[in-house]
Image (cartoon, rainbow, N blue to C red):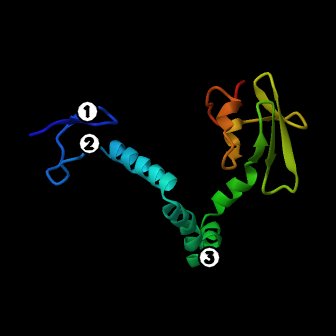
């Protein structure tokens, strides 16, 4: 029987007799990578597929309009936790602007000697921040610290 090397993990495997052109082993991690790669390539190459992927969450939300309201009613602890955590709105290596749901104003954060502080001088943990999509908080500290230790200090 023919043996092949998986293009992700590089282990040797025998392709399925039903899929003789199989180039990825059956390991769940390798299969996940294969599907993700296909999805990215399909989105890049097929505008109709891309549009369907964009429309799908909107259709789900229109079919389930009360989902988040019900979720918040059933999970009050999650709601309170989210209200207490600042959300990063914009950031660079020296400053961040964030918002807290329970407060009306945004907060400005400043970096001093690898630690982050609010405008009034209170130290803040980077891990307590919820980044807005597209904001890479990893740029602000070299290592990940536990929530009880302020980042970088």
Say the numbered circle drawn on residue 25.
2
Residue at left 68%, top 29%?
A: 141
Residue at left 60%, top 76%?
A: 62
Number of marks drawn: 3
Residue at left 73%, top 49%?
A: 85
Within 10 Å of the Cα at label 3, are there few (<14), some (14-19), or many (20+) other Cα atoms?
Answer: few
Nearer to me, 18 or 150? 18
Within 10 Å of the Cα at label 2, are there few (<14), some (14-19), or many (20+) other Cα atoms?
Answer: many
Q: SS class of the residue under badge 2? A: loop
- Residue 146: give x, y in percent of width and height: 62, 33
Within 10 Å of the Cα at label 1, are there few (<14), some (14-19), or many (20+) other Cα atoms?
Answer: few
Residue at left 62%, top 76%?
A: 65
- Residue 119: give x, y in percent of width and height: 89, 37
Q: Is residue 43 above or below residue 14?
A: below
**Any part of residue 149 in sight:** no
Q: Which residue is mark 3?
A: 65
Q: Is 84 situated left or right of 52 in this image?
A: right
Q: Earlier in the sequence, mark 3 or mark 1?
A: 1
Q: SS class of the residue under badge 3? A: loop
**Cβ atoms at labels 2 and 1 below 8 Å apart:** yes
Q: Is residue 26 above or below residue 149?
A: below
Nearer to me, 33 or 41? 41
Q: Quadrant of the N terminus?
A: top left
């Amino acid at each position: 029987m023919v043996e092949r090397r998986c293009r992700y993990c590089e282990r040797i495997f025998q392709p399925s007799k039903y899929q003789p052109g199989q180039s990825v082993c059956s390991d769940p991690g390798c299969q996940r990578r294969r599907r993700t790669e296909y999805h990215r390539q399909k989105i890049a190459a097929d505008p109709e597929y891309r549009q369907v992927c964009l429309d799908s969450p909107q259709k789900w939300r229109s079919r389930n309009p009360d989902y988040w309201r019900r979720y918040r009613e059933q999970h009050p602890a999650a709601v309170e936790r989210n209200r207490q955590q600042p959300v990063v709105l914009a950031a660079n290596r020296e400053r961040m602007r964030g918002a807290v749901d329970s407060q009306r104003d945004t907060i400005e954060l400043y970096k001093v000697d690898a630690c982050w502080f609010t405008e009034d001088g209170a130290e803040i943990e980077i891990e307590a921040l919820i980044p807005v999509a597209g904001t890479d908080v990893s740029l602000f500290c070299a290592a990940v610290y536990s929530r009880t230790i302020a980042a970088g200090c």
